[in-house]
């Protein structure tokens, strides 16, 4: 086998120009996979983290039954002693924030103009981390001392024709079904990036919302870790706490429907690109190997005359394909990584706002070991497969005819 | 040692059937130094191919070392060639990516010999053909005569019972051709290896102790 590898390796560099072109096809393909795969992973990571840190948190805790019936009967599914639950939850390591929330909806009015809104009552003292992905485009963010202040989405503000410092009236129904209203002062205008959300959202202090809804309870408790990877470690403890307290929990991954749709879409595109690159590389290597067999017919005849079996001839060409894949794959990984670093160092790729979003972003290329390994193994497999037919043809040459070949 | 009975070989060339060999009977014993003469197209190479187990006859029987080659599978024929027969080609047919040492070593690798034994045998035969200073040279760094010496070393390194040489001096100048023939003759006398070579050069024929002349596929 050592001799076959030696022969295969030397044969590989007999026609240096052709081998270089084959390697270039592999390297280009590998670089494309590494860079696009890294871009896709960056997009997944960015979308996942922004979804978690602006909306969902890592884990949401509700009163038991909330997920099934909470929408229809919200007043029956509120957490009655949120402080006690939060105190228990803080025993879990790596938690950066636990906050209470109350959501509601209704009408918002300047007195002259009225629109619908979707409100969220937040614990301002705890909410800092969750606001990281919100951009205040006018005014200032909510502070704990702003007990009657509120932040409004930029599109909703435009719709109302209001400005920072104005007093707006929100009207909704209390938990008992009574219509209630209160005024708040607009302290800031925020942009989340999601245009639809910016056109309806109003953020108010949770105590103000409790007053509006006439309740002291909490709809949901949101838990945020310093790292998404920490969630798995905390699940068993959370499950135990919620079970004992008549509560239930949902993970971010159960709630991030948009994220999963994007991942599904990008995974599909990435697979198609991988297949296209794979086919191009396969044809390129098959062409190289076929030409190599054609040029070495007489040599194959000589090897066969000396007693080399058909199987060994086949192995020789398959090993050549394997080596093309191994060498090309290694160089491809290096070039792919260098390309990714170059893109990142030069500031990344500027991406226009996706559909439904108001802001674009700068994409970087993540170096993902799984993608490097997967693309390397794919290239090795493809190049080995592409050598099978030429190898078979070489092994089936008739010795006498091969020796007479000019 | 080599016994051919009523051997014919036909090729189809388009719609025409070419009768390359017609009823050949041949009996060659151990240690003979045989030349097969005849003009181009007389069937010399076809006959050598059959004796070398590279091809099978259309009819008749070919026995090499008491084995009827027609009954053998491809892998068995390959094994028989590797263990029993050495080949010397007109165009030398060395493997261009291997150096002289590696070219000579190749048939022994197929036999799976221990490393030390392989090395000893390769170095010994290379010394016998006078190329000890050229073991690291690749074929394109050797002269025609040196290449043919490497080919002879490669053919003999397995200690074959039979060496087949298809016009071994055709691509060499006269002086080198004679040197090669004398080398082959020396090997034949030393180890009693049977040599069969084809040629259409009358000067070469005189080295043989038996000559068969082929004409239009028949021995005359």
Image (spheres, coloured by chain):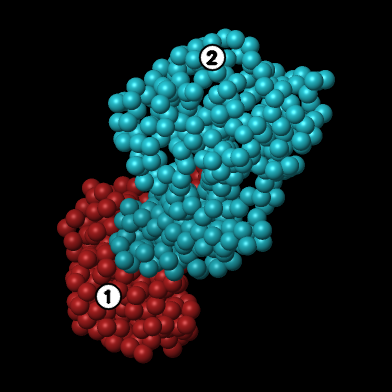
Q: CA distance from mark 2 to mark 1?
A: 102 Å
User: In this picture, is B203 found above or below A5?
Assistant: below
Asked whether the viewer can see residue A85, the reply is yes
Q: Residues within 10 Å of mark 1 (few under 14, many from 20)?
A: many
Which quadrant of the rendered structure holds the N terminus of chain A?
bottom left
Q: Which of B128/A44 is in front?
A: A44
Residue that appears at 71% across and 32% down: A185
Question: Nearer the observer, disc 2 or disc 1?
Answer: 2
On the image, the x and y values in percent for residue A360 come to: 70, 43
State the image quarter where residue B139 is shown. Answer: bottom left
Q: Chain of mark 2?
A: A
- Residue farthest top in this picture: A177
B158 relative to A95 in the view: left or right:
left
The picture's colour for chain B is: red
Q: Mark number for residue A175?
A: 2
Q: Residues within 10 Å of mark 2 (few under 14, many from 20)?
A: some
Q: Which of B22/B108 is in front?
A: B108
Q: Chain of mark 1?
A: B
User: In this picture, is B11 found above or below A150?
Assistant: below
Q: Which chain is cyan?
A: A
Residue picked out by circle 1 = B156
A325 relative to B206 in the view: left or right:
right
On the image, the x and y values in percent for residue B207 come to: 32, 81
State the image quarter where residue A180 is shown. Answer: top right
- Residue farthest left in this picture: B66
Residue that appears at 24% across and 60% down: B80
């Amino acid at each position: 086998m050592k001799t076959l590898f030696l022969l295969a390796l030397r044969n590989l560099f007999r026609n240096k120009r052709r081998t270089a072109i084959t390697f270039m096809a592999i390297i280009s393909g590998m670089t494309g996979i590494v860079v696009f795969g890294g871009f896709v992973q960056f997009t997944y990571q960015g979308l996942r983290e922004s979804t978690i840190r602006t909306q969902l948190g890592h884990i949401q805790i509700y009163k038991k039954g909330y997920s099934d019936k909470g929408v229809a009967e919200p007043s029956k599914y509120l957490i009655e002693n949120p402080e006690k639950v939060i105190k228990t939850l803080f025993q879990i390591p790596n938690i950066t924030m636990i906050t209470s929330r109350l959501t509601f909806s209704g009408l918002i009015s300047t007195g002259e103009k009225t629109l619908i809104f979707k409100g969220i009552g937040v614990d301002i003292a705890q909410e800092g981390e969750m606001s990281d992905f919100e951009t205040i485009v006018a005014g200032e963010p909510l502070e704990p001392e702003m007990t009657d202040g509120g932040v409004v989405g930029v599109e909703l503000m435009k719709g109302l024709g209001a400005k920072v410092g104005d007093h707006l009236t929100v009207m909704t129904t209390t938990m008992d079904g009574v219509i209630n209203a209160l005024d708040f002062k607009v302290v800031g205008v925020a942009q989340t990036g999601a245009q639809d959300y910016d056109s309806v959202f109003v953020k108010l202090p949770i105590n103000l919302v409790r007053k509006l809804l006439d309740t002291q309870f909490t709809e949901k408790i949101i838990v945020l870790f310093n790292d998404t990877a920490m969630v798995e470690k905390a699940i068993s403890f959370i499950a135990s706490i919620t079970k004992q307290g008549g509560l239930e929990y949902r993970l971010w991954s159960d709630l991030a429907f948009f994220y999963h749709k994007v991942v599904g879409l990008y995974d599909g595109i990435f697979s198609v690109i991988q297949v296209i690159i794979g086919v191009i590389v396969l044809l390129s290597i098959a062409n190289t190997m076929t030409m190599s067999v054609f040029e070495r017919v007489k040599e194959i005849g000589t090897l066969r005359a000396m007693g080399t079996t058909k199987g060994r001839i086949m192995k020789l060409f398959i090993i050549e394909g394997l080596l093309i894949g191994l060498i090309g794959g290694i160089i491809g990984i290096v070039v792919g990584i260098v390309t990714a670093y170059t893109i990142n160092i030069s500031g990344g790729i500027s991406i226009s706002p996706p559909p439904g979003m108001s802001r674009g972003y700068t994409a970087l290329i993540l170096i993902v070991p799984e993608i490097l390994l997967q693309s390397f193994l794919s290239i090795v497999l493809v190049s080995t497969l592409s050598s099978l037919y030429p190898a078979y043809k070489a092994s089936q040459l008739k010795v006498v005819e091969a020796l007479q070949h000019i | 040692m080599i016994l051919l009975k009523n051997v014919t070989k036909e090729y189809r060339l388009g719609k025409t059937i070419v009768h390359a060999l017609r009823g050949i009977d041949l009996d060659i014993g151990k240690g003979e130094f045989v030349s097969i003469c005849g003009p181009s197209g007389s069937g010399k190479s076809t006959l050598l191919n059959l004796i070398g187990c590279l091809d099978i006859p259309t009819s008749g029987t070919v026995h090499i070392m008491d084995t009827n080659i027609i009954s053998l599978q491809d892998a068995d024929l390959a094994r028989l060639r590797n263990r029993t027969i050495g080949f010397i080609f007109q165009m030398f047919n060395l493997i261009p990516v291997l150096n002289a040492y590696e070219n000579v070593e190749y048939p022994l690798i197929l036999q799976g010999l221990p490393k030390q034994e392989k090395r000893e045998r390769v170095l010994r035969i290379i010394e016998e053909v006078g190329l000890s200073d050229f073991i690291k040279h690749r074929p394109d760094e050797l002269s025609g005569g040196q290449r043919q010496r490497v080919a002879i070393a490669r053919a003999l390194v397995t200690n074959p019972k039979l060496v087949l040489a298809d016009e071994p001096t055709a691509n060499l100048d006269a002086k080198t051709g004679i040197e090669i023939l004398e080398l082959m003759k020396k090997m034949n006398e030393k180890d009693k290896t049977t040599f069969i070579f084809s040629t259409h050069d009358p000067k070469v024929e005189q080295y043989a102790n038996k000559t068969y002349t082929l004409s239009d596929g028949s021995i005359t």
